[in-house]
Amino acid sequence: MKLIARPLLLLGLLLTPLAWADAPARATHPDGAAIASGHALATQAGMDILAQGGNAFDAAVAVSSTLAVVEPISSGLGGGGFFLLHDAATGKDVMLDARETAPQAATPQAFLDKDGNLDRDRSINGAWSAGIPGLPAALVELSARHGKLPLKTALQPAIRIAREGFPVYARMAKGYASRADVMQRYPGTREVYLRNGRPIAEGDVFRQPELARTLERLAEGGFDGFYRGQTGRLLLAGVKQAGGRWTAEELAGYQVKLREPIVFDYNGWKITTAPPPSSGGIALAAMLQILEGWDIKAMDPAHRTHLVVESMRRAYRDRTFFLGDPDFVQIPQKVLTSKDYAQGLRATIHPEKATPSDLLSGNPTPLEDDETTHFSIIDAAGNRVGATQTVNLLYGSGLIPKGTGVLLNNEMDDFALKPGTPNAFGVMGYEANAPRPGKRMLSSMTPTFMENDDKVVVLGTPGGSRIITMVLLGVLGYDAGLQAQQVAALPRYHHQWLPDLIEAETDTFDADTIKQLQAMGHRIDLPGEVAAGGRGSSHVWGNLQTVEWDRRSNTLYGGSDPRNPVGSAQVTD
C-alpha cells in the first residue's frame, strides 16, 4: 500500500536547495516510457498499446477509454476533457479541447424554478444537466491525427474490460451510495448499476456489455459510430425519455477544438498549460509570476503559505470576472498572463497581512468535481500527453440512456446558470460564463507540462476548483527538487477568493504555522473545524498523476497520488 510522505519532511525538502555535480550531457529522448493514471487497469492498457508499437497518443486513447470504463464515478464517454499534447518530432504543443457544449434548449431560463431561483435538481441531475459529450470525438481525433495504430486497436483494452468486468472498488461503491436516489430514477441506469435489485458493492465484478457495444461502434465507425447511427439514436431517445431536449443536428455537429496552449516562464522552467475554456492556465500563469518576485523556498512555512495564498486569491478573483469560452467571450489573455500584470498584483500584497477578499474590487464576476480524473504519459520518442477528463459530479447526471451504457455528464452546472448564484462547488459566475447554444462551460482542468535543461514533467489532477492550486503546489514542488512520487504526495491547501478562507488537508500545517497565519488575518477551514461559509475541508483531496523525465541521467519516474489506492504509475526501460 502506498503511503503519504510526512508533510513536515516534504516542507523541509521544499526549503532545501539541491547541489548538483557538474551536469552530464542531456539525453535527447527517454530510454523507455512512463504512464501514471487513476486506475491500474488504465495504466496497464496504455502500456499494452505501447508494447504493440503505439506511441503516447495511441496509449492516451487506451488510457482515456479504459478510465471511461473503470472510473464511471469520474469520467466517461458521456463527458469531456482537455488533452495537452507534445509532438516530439515537430516540437509543437497543442491542446485538444473536448469540453462539452450547451444544447440549444439549455437557456438560463430553463434552469429557473417558478420563483426565479436556480433549480438545483435540474442543474445537476438528469437530462437537462448534460452537455453534448466531447470525449469520444477527442479519442477519434487523437488516433487519426497523432496515433500510429488504428483506433480499433487502441480501444480494444477498454472494450475487453467493459465486457469481462473489473472489481468494484470502495470509492466507486461509496460514490454510488451517495447518488443512488438520483441514479435509480432512470431505467437505463438501473439496468447497469443494480444486480437483481441490489446496488453494486465493493468486490462485485462490474460488467458493462452495452458500453462494450458502444465502444465497438466507436471503434468501427469513428466519429459517426458515436454521434450518428445507432448510438446517436439511442442517446437522443434516452435524453428525450428523461425529459431533455437534444437534437440530432447538435449531437452530430460536435467538434473538437484545437487550442494554442498558454506558455510562460517560471524560475527557469518553461510552463505549457491549458488555455480557455480552461481557467487553469491563466490562473497558473498569474500565480506563479506573482510568486516569482520572492524567494519563497527560503521562507518559513507561514510566510511562504501566506504569499502563495495571496497569489491564489488574486488569480481566482480574475477567473471570476474575465474567463469563459473564448469562442463567445473576449478574454484579455495577453494582459492576464503578462509579467507586468503579475508585478502589479504582487504590489498589492502585504508581506505580513492577509488581504480581505471583499477589498479586492468586486463588480459582476465563476469547477470540476473531485471525481474528475487525470493521466500523464511520456513515450520513448519524447511524445507526451497530459489529459484531464470528467463527467463533473459523482457519476455525472446519473442518467444512462438505455442501450448505450453511456453515463451522461452534468456539466451544465459549470455554467453561470443564474448570475451571482454559486454552483455546486461554491463558485459564482456572471455573463462571461453564461450558457449559450454550442458554448463550452468554464473549467478548472489544468493539464500542464514543465521543462528546463534538466527535466521534462507532465502533471495534472482532478479536484474541482482546487485543481488549479494543486497543480500550482505540484509545480512549486518540482521547482524545489522533489521527484514525481513526492510531488504526488505533497500536502495541499487552497484559496479561491470567495469564500474568504484557506482550505487545508489534515496535517498540512502544524500548530505554530496555523497560529501565525491566523495572526496575519487568514481564516483557515480545517477538517473537523468548518468555518462559516466554507465547504468543510475533507481529510484529503485530489488525485494527482505525474511523470518525470530526468534528462541528465535519462531516467523516467512516475508519481501516482497515494490518496487513491487504485491509482498506478508504471515505467518501462
Image (cartoon, helix red, strand yellow):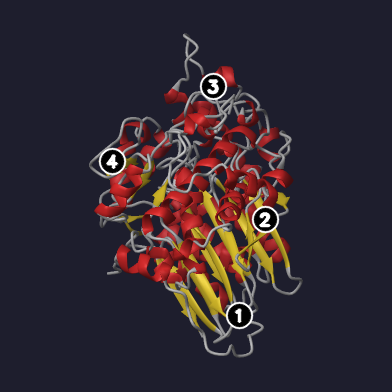
Secondary structure of residue under mark 4 = helix
Give the number of the disc on residue 177. 4
Give the number of the disc on residue 418. 3
Q: From mark 2 to mark 4, how far is it between C-alphas?
A: 35 Å
Question: Which residue does the numbered mark 1 point to in the structure image?
Answer: 380
| Residue at image point 60% right, 41% down | 100
Secondary structure of residue under mark 1 = loop
> Of callouts 1 and 2, which one flags the residue occurring earlier in the amino acid sequence?
2
In this rendering, the count of numbered labels is: 4
Along the viewing direction, whichever of 194 and 342 lies nearer the viewer: 342
Question: Which residue does the numbered mark 2 point to in the structure image?
Answer: 95
Q: From mark 4 to mark 3, how far is it between C-alphas?
A: 29 Å
Residue 207 shows in this picture? no
Secondary structure of residue under mark 3 = loop
Along the viewing direction, whichever of 430 and 224 lies nearer the viewer: 430
> Of callouts 2 and 4, which one flags the residue occurring earlier in the amino acid sequence?
2
